[in-house]
Amino acid sequence: MKFRFAGCPAFTLSGALALLLAFSTPAAAQFGPKKQTEPAVGENYVLEIQYLWWKPDLIGSVSSDRLDLVGSRVDLVGDLGFKGDTRFRDWRFTLKPGRKHKFRFEYSPLKFEAEGVLTREITFAGQTFPVSLPIESSLEWKVWRLGYEWDFISRSRGYVGALFEVRKTDLSAELNSLVASGEVFATAPLPAIGIVTRVYPLPDLAVHFEFSGMKAPDSFFGDRFSGVYTDMELSATVNISKNLGITGGWRRMNTDIRVSQDFGDLKFRGYSFGAAVRF
């Protein structure tokens, strides 16, 4: 059993930032006694709470095999008419017992709803939905993330760290019409590893980048579950004080999972905006 970490060209950026942080000390200081520098204004905390509004576009499909019927690959946008016109909440908690150590928790609930008319016949959860039939559909997606971050390079103007996480994903999709209805629910655990980088180009401005993911093969969960997960985020935070910051950024989250006879290939991407409170 092997895990393969999902690669990304963005690691070039994180590698460059790591070198910048590692060699950011002036040359003259390298020959004198080391000075103990205070962390940047946005890093002096024990507990940080972030509340974000996220408005992602949705691309993807779901399918479900039931009663010896092979499910159709149902396109969430083309077949069901889902649109990314709703803002969602994103809660994040970070406990920082030491300068290089962080414990992180995140909860991201998403829900899409749509009404439309089918342009083709589809089979979903053992039910057949005829063409030209009015249909109501919903999709709920919830992700819990619990992780540990170790900042192996830590400077007063930023850091580079490794991220280790356990994630739990709940997916439910429902289709309802006058003649049939079908619903699937899947829960999938998925570990992840990643890299986190933050730099302070200005004393009160932090630029943050992180990328994480993992591929779990079929054999890892006894052929019941398999999946690929990647999550990338680039954001900036203006720190009004050491206790308050305003943040905004862009996030892309891709998940391709199989749980028993249910399949989901989902991509969320969009801008976020929120605030961070620190204690």
Image: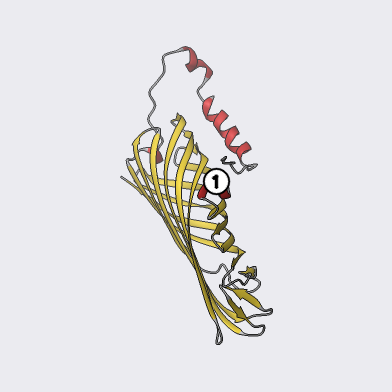
Residue pictured at 43% horizontal, 38% vertical: 149
Which quadrant: the N terminus?
top right
Residue located at (52% from left, 29% from top): 21
Q: Residue at x 64, y 74 (%)?
A: 79
Asked if residue 267 lies left or right of residue 92, the reply is: right
The one nearer the camera, 201 or 14, is: 14
Q: Vertical placement of 51 versus 148: above or below?
A: below
Residue 15: in sight, yes or no? yes
In this rendering, position of residue 10 left or right of residue 183: right
At label 1, counting other C-alpha atoms closer than 10 Å, the crowd grade (few under 14, some 14-19, many 20 or more) is: many
- 227 above or below 183? above
Whether residue 176 appears in this view of the structure is: no
Q: Which of these two is toward me, 212 or 69?
A: 69
Q: Position of residue 89 (x, y in %)?
A: 44, 61
Q: Residue furthest right?
A: 120
Q: Residue 9: name its quadrant.
A: top right
Which quarter shows the C terminus? top left
* Residue at mark 1: 213
Residue sitting at x 56%, y 52%: 227
Coloring basis for residues = secondary structure
Is 57 situated above or below 28?
Answer: below
Q: Residue 128 appears at what percent x and percent y? A: 61, 79
Considering depth in this image, is 263 or 114 the residue closer to the camera? 263
The answer to whether residue 122 is left or right of residue 220 is right
Q: Amino acid at mark 1?
A: Gly
Q: Residue furthest left?
A: 279
74 in relation to 238, above or below: below
